[in-house]
Amino acid sequence: MLKSRLSALIITLLAAVLLTACAGVTPDDYADAEPEFRIEDYFDGRVYAWGMFQSRGGAIERRFTVDIDGRVDGNQITLDERFVYDDGETDRRVWEIEKIDDHTYEGTAGDIVGVATGQRDGNALNWRYTLALDVGERTWNLQFDDWMVLVDEDTLINTAEVTKFGVRVGTVTLFFRRADAEGLAP
C-alpha cells in the first residue's frame, strides 16, 4: 500500500515538473519592460528589415531584406511587406491586422492559413500563425511562433521558431528599423 502511494506521489511530482517546464514564457512576463511595443504605433509608416532563415542545425539557408509600408486606420493595421532574397527572388505579403483590445491582435494575409493571433505586453509581442510555403510542387504548412521585442523606439528584433507537425524546422531572425530613424531617412 505504501509502495503504491509512493509511486503515485512520484508520478504526480514528475507530471507537475513536466507541466511547469512546458509552461514557457508569456507576454505577461514583459509587462513592465519598456519601451512599450504597440504594432499600430511602430508600423505606422515605413519600416525596413533585414533577416535570415537558419536550419534546425544552425546553417544560414537564406538571407533577405524587407521593405514595409504600414498604414493604420482606427483598429485596422495594413502591413505591405516586399521581400528581396539573397538569390534575387522577390515576394510580397500584405497583412491585414485588427487590434482586438489593448493586448490582442488578429491578422490575415494571402499565404497565411486561418487567422494569426498576437498577444502583447510591455515591450514584447508573441505572434503565432501558419504559413503556406510552396516547396517545389508541394505546399508545406509551417507554424511560426514569433517573438518581437522593441529595443528602442526605432529598433525591433524578431525571432521565430518554425515547426512542422511540432518538429522544429528552423529559426527566422529579423531586425527592424523605422525609416525615419536617424541615418535611414530617404
Image (spheres, rainbow, N blue to C red):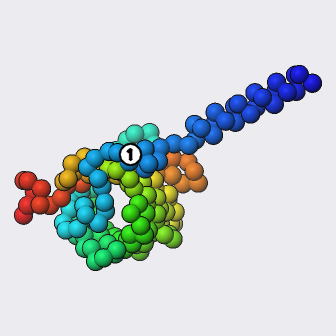
Q: Is residue 136 visible?
A: no
Q: Position of residue 134 (x, y in %)?
A: 45, 66
Q: Nearer the viewer, residue 118 or 85?
A: 118
Dot 1: few (<14), some (14–19), or many (≥20) neighbours within 10 Å? some
Locate residue 55: give its quadrant.
top left
Q: Look at the picture and state if 90 lies above or below 162.
A: below
Which residue is most to the bottom? 73
Q: Nearer the viewer, residue 178 or 135?
A: 178
Q: Position of residue 82 (x, y in %)?
A: 26, 67
How many marks the image carries: the answer is 1
Q: Is residue 110 visible?
A: yes
Q: Is residue 133 left or right of residue 165?
A: left
Q: Which residue is mark 1?
A: 30
- Of the 4 image quadrants, the one containing the C terminus is bottom left
| Image point (64%, 36%), residue name | 18
Q: Is residue 89 left or right of residue 160?
A: left
- Of the 4 image quadrants, the one containing the N terminus is top right
What's the amino acid at mark 1? Tyr
Q: Nearer the viewer, residue 6 or 135?
A: 6
Q: Look at the picture and state if 171 lies above or below 46.
A: above
Q: Position of residue 9 (x, y in %)?
A: 78, 29
Q: Is residue 27 left or right of residue 46?
A: right
| Image point (75%, 27%), residue name | 10
Q: Nearer the viewer, residue 180 or 186?
A: 180
Which residue is most to the right? 1
| Image point (23%, 68%), residue name | 44
| Image point (51%, 47%), residue name | 168
